[in-house]
Amino acid sequence: MTDNLFAEFNDEFEKLRKELGFKASLSELDEIFSLTDFILKFRFVPTNLSYQIRYRIVEYYNSSAGYLHSLLMPNPQNLVNLNESKLFNSDEKKLIGDLFAECMHLNSRNTLINLNPNKKEEGKLIDDAVKFWKGKFKPESEKIFRKVNKYWSGEK
């Protein structure tokens, strides 16, 4: 990233952080949602940075929700879905359902913010997305993917 672009991004981010009142740092959000990659891809800092940050968050959780959904309700014509879904017992599927529901909750909250802009809610959504990642999503997803990876490696 060019130094000027990164400096502009950092400055705009800090202004936005103060305006919306969220606590998450740029490095924290970047580590989870790859914000810098977005800026690098387009080579400019968007004028509606808040929208773009929320878009990246929702994009990530929406993609994850799609995968979690396939574990809960596998497509009967998809061998990958069928095999991976069978790996999990009912307690694990309950947890997968909880992760799925929280992903969808964050996604629908973002849609509500788009429909009815609210700076306080924007800031809260950003912090809640980070809190969910650290407190539940990452550790539980790691367990899920370890189990899936073990299956596909042929380990018993």
Image: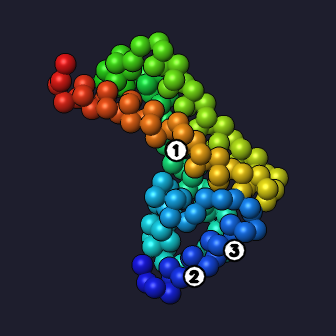
Q: Amino acid at mark 1?
A: Lys
Q: Residue furthest bottom?
A: 4
**Residue that label 3 marks:** 15
The N terminus lies in quadrant:
bottom left
Residue 78 is situated, as x and y percent measured from the top left of the image, at 35, 25
Q: Which residue is mark 2?
A: 8
Query: Of marks 1 and 3, which one's residue comes earlier in the chain?
Result: 3
Question: Residue 135: percent from the left, percent from the top?
Answer: 54, 39
As shown in the figure, which amino acid type bears the numbered disc 2? Glu
Q: Which mark is residue 62?
A: none
Residue 106 falls in which quadrant of the image? Answer: top right
User: Residues at badges 2 and 3 in contact (C-beta under 8 Å)?
Assistant: no
Alpha-carbon neighbours of circle 1 within 10 Å: few (<14), some, or many (≥20)?
few
Looking at the image, can residue 48 be seen? no
At 79% across and 59% down in the image, what residue appears? 119
Asked if residue 14 lies left or right of residue 1, the reply is right
Instruction: Give me the C-alpha separation between circle 2 and circle 3.
Output: 11 Å
Specify the quadrant of the image occupied by residue 71: top left
Residue 152 found in image quarter: top left
Residue 12 in view of the camera: yes
Relative to 28, say whether 151 is above or below: above
Q: Which callout, 2 or 3, points at the residue further toward the start of the chain?
A: 2
Residue pictured at 74% horizontal, 61% vertical: 21
Pointer 2: residues within 10 angstroms few (<14), some, or many (20+)?
some
Which mark is drawn over residue 134?
1
The one of 18 and 51 positioned closer to us in this rendering: 18
Residue kind at label 3, given as amino acid type: Lys
